Amino acid sequence: MTALKLELRGITKRFGSLVANDHIDLTVEPGEIHCLLGENGAGKSTLMNVLYGLYEPTSGEIVVDGTPREFRTAGDAIAAGIGMVHQHFMLVPVFTVAENVMLGHEETQALGWLDRRRAKKKVLDLVAEYGLAVDPDALVEDLPVGLQQRVEILKALVRDAKVLILDEPTAVLTPQETEELFRVMRSLRESGVSIVFITHKLKEVKAVADRITVIRRGKVVGSADPAASETELASLMVGRPVDLVVHKEPAQPGEVRFALDKLTVLDDFGNVQVDAVDLELREGEILGIAGVQGNGQTELTQAILGLRRPAAGSIRLDGRDITALSPRKTLDAGVGFVPEDRQHDGIVGEFTVSENLVLDLVTRPPFGNGISVDPKAVRDNARKRVAEFDIRTQSIDTPAGSLSGGNQQKVVVAREMSRPLRMFIASQPTRGVDVGAMEFIHQRIVAERDIGTPVIIVSTELDEVVALADRIAVMYRGRIVGIVPPTASREQLGLLMAGVDDPELLARAAGNPNLVTEDDSTATAEGSAPEADPTAGEEGQA
Amino acid sequence: MTESNNANRGNDANDASGSGKANEPAAAPTATQPAAKAPQKSFGRQVLDGIVTGNSAVVTFLAIVLALVVGAILIVLSDQDVLDKYQYFFADPGDALSASWTVVKDAYVALFKGAILDPDTLDSNYAPYILKPISETISMATPLIFGGLAVSIAFRAGLFNIGAQGQLIAGAILASWVGFTFDLPGALLLILVMLGGIIGGALYAGLAGVLKARFGAHEVIVTIMFNYIAVYFLGWLLTTTTFREADQQQPIGKPLDDGALLPRLFGDELRINLGIILALAAVALYWWILNRSAMGFELRAVGSNPDAARTAGMSVGRAQIVSMAIAGGLAGMVGVCQLAGPYNAGHQLSPTIDAGLGFTAITVALLGRTKPLGVVFAALLFGALQAGGSTMQAAAGVSIDIVMVIQAVIVLCVAAPALVRTIFRLKGAHKGGEGGLVAKETAGAEAV
């Protein structure tokens, strides 16, 4: 495969009076992983859509191997050897992997018969060439997200992509899948494919990038070396010094306010997802629930809110049994709830920011009396919250769906924190949120704790749990396999997250609190995947 | 691809501007000043909204133009005399063209005279003559307003209510039964008849809502099937002694008591009646429900993102049932109009009491984009076409079926705005910044 050099020269893209990209220069050398780092809404995706032929640049040119090219459609970009994997996959769920890969340029025999065998062989060839293990006969809908993403990558490769654009590829992945993706990216690089990796996650940049270009508000503000510290990168990206450490006083836990007693929750298919969980939460503490995604955290939070009726056990808040309450009554009982998927469950995209800020408050004073809604109160509230939570929106009447991910999250958090709470529970409070907003949301959560509210944080980001929590409960296959202080070593947490409950191994891990903490990303990766490698503990010690 | 592309474009534009404002968080919190100006500002926003819809208003207007052109072609094609002239087109093109022009002009002039104003009547100085066309238009539009709202409110809750036909029949059945059974003083009976219509329709549609909410039965299938059930149930009822007028050849129901009829507003010569006032009240209520009531807020939330609505403590099932029940009540009022209005001389149930209004209601809702005023204007337009169509048939000898074609083409174009843009070579997106409008437009089209 011949490598390809790609240059963007002075790309400017205006939307009306708005400058989304302002004279951006970018060079992607053959066979490098070039990271495009920037906050949500900085103009990364716009730039890539220009490159991929989806937008026409207002000015500037795209140069491929020294020749200026003009991409009017995505087809032109593909023909020039550019492939793109979108954040939201464009696959046909009921088709097999091979069928999806050949979709759009089907292999046919005479009379238009589909040649599935040849398509399958092509997939297998690519799989062998790049080490992208995936079964060509599997139905896409049966594949986990990480493998679906691989199918998208295959789709680009089968069209001879020499530059691959990955738009926020890790946003939907578990830590293991992320690590697996990085392995694939490196292997693609070895084969001469250049990769443009769009992200706002600093650890990932440091883990995989060869070069880093930082974009802020539509402009290139500099390039950085992957060896730069996270704080440096964050400051460059946000444009001001950023504090990545959550500052908080030691917790002053009071009495037990919230308790789960042998709570058992089933999923839609009748499988036990939460298995007889006992948990106590005290006034003024943050309990972090760590664990690899899919170990029952989702069902646990759904059961607490009342979206899912527990099969057994009880949930008590301030001595009151709230096990069987509907979501409405649970919210009324004083539970603040941030769902893990904000776009899906947290906001109504077509509603304005001000409407979203009262989504679960609209039936009660001061916003309404259950029958009518007071539009003035809703708007006044919106102005207040937008200012208080620094929600960056054109106006309070902007549809919430058009805000950046971080600002959508602020809308949800602002709403849930804008009333007196007896308990606050947040799932993935900063997923897909950029550094600046993350810092802010963390501060607010700590502030909520400091006024005495018991808080539960459910997160698959170990760093987040460690930074915020006063106690960490690790969930594995529906059970709480251990509760440890945030000072526990990454290794101990990692073992617990993988379900290892060998006391000796854990004790040894606990005895070395300083292990592998220097580089968090590798620690997280190791920590979440040692199931396949039960000797991780010994290795760490050696 | 273009559509999602446009949608992205809108998002990105907003994103970028959002971060563009990043440095002035103080802009928003100066709340006191804008608060004092709030009403003015909201007026400004209304104007802006007007421009936004203006984009689709242009499309709607062009859709009507296009429909009239298609109608004109059909008028020419259906006139044998004119077609004969085309046989010697190349010898004398003027003859064929002027004949075409005349026949089309006559038809559309008749349409206008029947729907808006007939200048010949101005000399008479007799108000009922002059106002008759507009009265016809309004009275034809009255049931369409109710019907359009019935489809719209379910649509806002995310349900495609195809069942206005069945619901209006259910309402008409109950209203009719109330009307010929009870012997009460006029106004009281009329109120009871209307309540009967509303309750009949609401129960029937509410049942479809319950099937949807509790058992997940798809509302499109259910309401279509409910239409059949209603039609055949009505057919059977009209064979029973309770409902059937005894000494009639046709299966036809017993007449309403005279006191139960919708009173005419301006004397017996004009058919405009109380129904239009009730319909406009229903429009106001519809606006209030959607924009000012807690129930409407939940209804819209459920229609837009049921998962988020559920997570915010709303009952998705309840919202679906309530919206269907309201839809059914509104459709029931269509039945009441048909029964107690001036359209049906005997004020009796008949197998064709629905008169196809259940389906026209869907097109009214689509053309009006489920907006309160949109529904009113769409209903008035269709009412005008109906009223004018009769005159056109009588005066110009052009079949009223042309009107159906015109209606269909309008709806087709409105449902596929890209088609209109292509035909008239409108700049698709005006490029860039107004992407939001386009996104909105396409979102609307997708929703349709």
Image (cartoon, coloured by chain):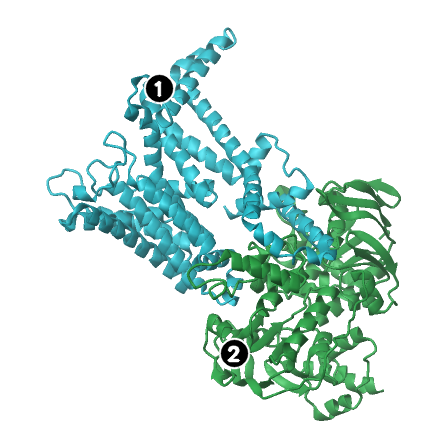
Chain colours: A green, B cyan
Proximity of marks 2 and 1: CB atoms separated by less than 8 Å = no
Label 2: chain? Answer: A
| Image location (x, y in percent) of residue A253 | 64, 87
> Could you tell me the amino acid type at mark 1?
Ala
Q: In the displayed structure, would residue B243 be above or below residue A389? A: above
In the picture, which quadrant includes the C terminus of chain A? bottom right
- Identify residue for label 1: B396
| Image location (x, y in percent) of residue B199 | 28, 54
Q: In the displayed structure, would residue A71 be above or below residue A387? A: above
| Image location (x, y in percent) of residue B424 | 58, 29
**Residue count near mark 2 (Cα–Cα under 10 Å), binned few <14, some 14–19, many ≥20:** many
Q: Which residue is pictured at 50% across the width and 61% down the height?
A: B306
Same chain letter for marks 2 and 1:
no
> Could you tell me the amino acid type at mark 2?
Val
Residue found farthest to the left: B247
- Identify residue for label 2: A265
In depth, the one of B281 and A124 nearer the eye is B281
Q: How far apart are marks 2 and 1 (CA)?
A: 73 Å
The answer to whether any part of residue A529 appears in the image is no
Q: In the displayed structure, would residue B233 be above or below residue A411? A: above
The answer to whether any part of residue A219 appears in the image is yes
Label 1: chain? Answer: B
In depth, the one of A426 and B75 nearer the eye is A426
In screen coordinates, is B271 left or right of B49? Answer: left
Circle number at residue B238 = none
- Secondary element at tag 2: strand
| Image location (x, y in percent) of residue A364 | 47, 66
In screen coordinates, is A469 left or right of A535? Answer: left
